[in-house]
């Protein structure tokens, strides 16, 4: 059994980041999603062997990128994030002591921040978004992963904490700015671009 497996859900590039439509064309959003996936794989590759990175996707281009990086791919049933992760769980029986679920839209989450996040020992560890509402990073022990209900979406932080409490699992919340900044709305994109102009805060993308 390996120490860690990272699961990276990746929606089809052409369908990703639809809430950025007011400021980015379909092609620009697809390009952004591709860049995010490549960057995420690079950062995770610095932390664990490529085969222990599992990309959930039905996008042929995303799967090609993942395989070229040495990552494992599992077809996403296009039923949504929560069913996709739950279905992937059946394909990952007891292969890791710990599981990390990392979306691709955390451009400020460098390897140091991810390492700090993983250093916290708990059954379930969560890095929330800036609003303290959603779940950005989620790590859990294998025992927790086997039965944990994935409840991503609006208000997922509270729902995940409640699910962990109901199951008697120890939880840890890690609030760190670089892990909290996901790119969903035009305002998020604007803030990220402003940060990119500050050399000391340059994004890894």
Image (spheres, rainbow, N blue to C red):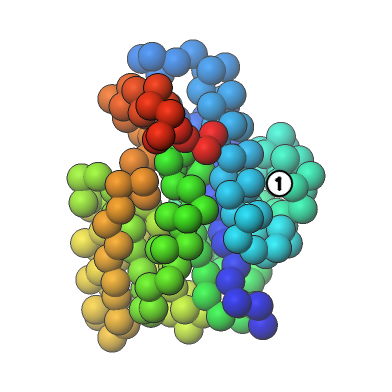
Callout 1 environment at 10 Å: few (<14), some (14 to 19), or many (20+)?
many
Residue occupying image coordinates x 71% and y 58%: 50
Residue 186 in the figure: left or right of residue 49 = left
Label 1 element class: helix
Residue 196 in the figure: left or right of residue 12 = left
Which quarter of the rendering shows the N terminus?
A: bottom right
Q: Name the spot of residue 115 as percent of width and height, x first.
A: 48, 62
Closer to the camera in the image, 156 or 125:
125
Closer to the camera in the image, 148 or 106:
106
The residue indicated by pointer 1 is: 66
Residue 185 vertical placement versus 163 (above, below) = above
Report which quarter residue 45 is drawn in. bottom right
Q: Name the spot of residue 10 as percent of width and height, x first.
A: 56, 44
Report which quarter residue 7 is drawn in. bottom right
Residue 137 vertical placement versus 60 (above, below) = below
Residue occupying image coordinates x 59% and y 36%: 12
Residue occupying image coordinates x 58% and y 49%: 43
Residue 88 in the figure: left or right of residue 126 = right
Which quarter of the rendering shows the C terminus?
A: top right
Residue occupying image coordinates x 43% and y 41%: 108
Residue 119 vertical placement versus 179 (above, below) = below
Q: Name the spot of residue 11 as percent of width and height, x first.
A: 54, 40
């Amino acid at each position: 059994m390996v120490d860690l497996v990272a699961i990276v859900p990746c929606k089809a590039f052409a369908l990703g980041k639809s809430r950025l439509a007011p400021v980015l064309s379909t092609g620009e959003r697809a390009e952004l999603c591709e860049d995010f996936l490549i960057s995420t794989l690079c950062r995770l590759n610095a932390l664990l062997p490529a085969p222990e990175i599992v990309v959930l996707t039905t996008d042929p281009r995303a799967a090609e990128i993942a395989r070229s990086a040495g990552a494992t791919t599992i077809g996403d049933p296009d039923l949504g994030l929560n069913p996709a992760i739950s279905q992937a769980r059946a394909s990952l029986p007891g292969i890791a002591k710990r599981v990390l679920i990392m979306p691709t839209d955390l451009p400020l989450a460098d390897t140091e921040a991810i390492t700090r996040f993983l250093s916290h020992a708990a059954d379930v560890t969560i890095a929330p978004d800036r609003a303290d509402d959603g779940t950005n990073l989620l790590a859990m022990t294998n025992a927790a992963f086997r039965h944990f209900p994935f409840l991503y979406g609006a208000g997922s932080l509270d729902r995940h904490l409640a699910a962990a409490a109901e199951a008697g699992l120890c939880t840890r919340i890690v609030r760190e700015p670089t892990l909290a900044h996901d790119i969903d709305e035009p305002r998020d994109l604007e803030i990220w671009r402003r940060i990119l102009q500050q050399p000391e805060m340059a994004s890894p993308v």
